[in-house]
Image (tube, grey):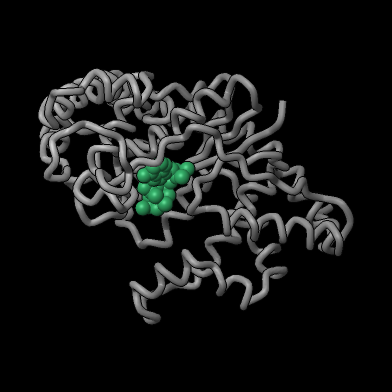
Amino acid sequence: RPRLLSGMQPTSGSLHLGNYLGALKQWVALQDTHEALYCVVDLHALTVAPDPAELRERTRWTAAQYVAAGIDPERSALFVQSHVPAHAQLAWVLSCLTGFGEAGRMTQFKDKSAKQGSDSTTVGLFTYPVLMAADILLYQAAEVPVGEDQRQHLELTRNLAQRFNSRFGDTFVVPEPFIPKETAKIYDLQDPTAKMSKSSSSPNGIVDVMDDPKVTAKKIRSAVTDTGREVLYDPVEKAGVSNLLSIHSALSGRTIAELEADFAGRGYGDLKKELAEVVTDALGPVRARATELMADPGALDELLAAGADRANEIAERTLATVYDKVGLVGRA
Ligand code: ATP
Ligand code: MG
């Protein structure tokens, strides 16, 4: 079984429908075919200077939602990035192999730093992709499920792996991007041309996994649609309605064509009403289970410690090889 690694940043207390459908649901399915490691990348979240108490809280909530959605800690290693010191240690070695210009070409850095201005942009944001490379290479992961937005970072990871291998001898598995087919990309309900994103500025456009069902229904009711009346899938002319249809289809398992036929002669109101039910039915159990897990933080922390032990064993082995190959003296 090929080894696979993925993670999300604890940048918000709740995951949203895009994270759930675009990533988490796939992760759950991939446990059947892969040896999976799933982490909450809290070190990455430091790049946005979160409030310390919030970061701690959000890290646990993110882990709780992984488990609640079906990540099985018996089968998959579920852990918090900062619990495995080798992530930061390997990142240092890799940063000494990364060109300054090479890192500067990362479009996510260019976008985010342009928004912040150079005085508030940190070196951490600049080296973010190097830490991501370390996350992946430590585990010799053959495959990495990534969204389109992470493609360039994965390319850097591959380049660093190849560079290290050719300079110091075969060490790292060069990972392949894994884009599961039929992964839904979910758009913002208020701006259906922008992807639903934790860091977006329109809270009403984001359906959170942890939202109260009433809030979910309200957000869906007020989703932006066009002035037409027919429920048809047309991402260009009817971006809003199409987004609602894809969400429905991804959760209900019914095809878009079936849904169009079903809603023929009925209006957008009907679609929204039914969709609110489909969404709250699907997320309800996840929300309930996550809340339950959070009620016993001691048990959750133990589960994360066990995951960190498993991850650490693999990571330590890779780091020891790397330290040796680059010429660091081993400690007696
Ligand atoms: P941020 O705005 O902080 O970058 P995000 O919402 O983009 O947050 P990430 O933690 O960057 O979330 O991504 C976690 C996972 O969710 C990734 O695999 C990403 O590809 C996926 N994902 C994020 N947004 C969507 C979306 N709108 N539709 C489908 N998948 C998504
Ligand atoms: Mg993102």
The front one of 270 and 112 is 270
Identity of the residue drawn at 66% across and 56% down = 157
Vertical position of residue 187 compared to residue 47: above or below? above
Identity of the residue drawn at 50% across and 42% down = 7
Identity of the residue drawn at 27% across and 54% down = 200
- Asked if residue 245 shows in the view, the reply is yes
Side (left or right) of 251 relative to 32: left
Give the image location of residue 96, x and y in percent. Answer: 70, 70
The front one of 186 and 16 is 186
Side (left or right) of 181 relative to 24: right
| Residue at far right of view | 169
Q: Quadrant of the N terminus?
A: top right
| Residue at far bottom of view | 119
Give the image location of residue 258, x and y in percent. Answer: 32, 19
Q: How many marks?
A: 0
Q: Quadrant of residue 56?
A: top left
- Asked if residue 10 shows in the view, the reply is no
Vertical position of residue 44 compared to residue 116: above or below? above
Side (left or right) of 170 relative to 62: right
Give the image location of residue 206, x and y in percent. Answer: 24, 43
Identity of the residue drawn at 22% across and 44% down = 189
Give the image location of residue 243, x and y in percent. Answer: 29, 38
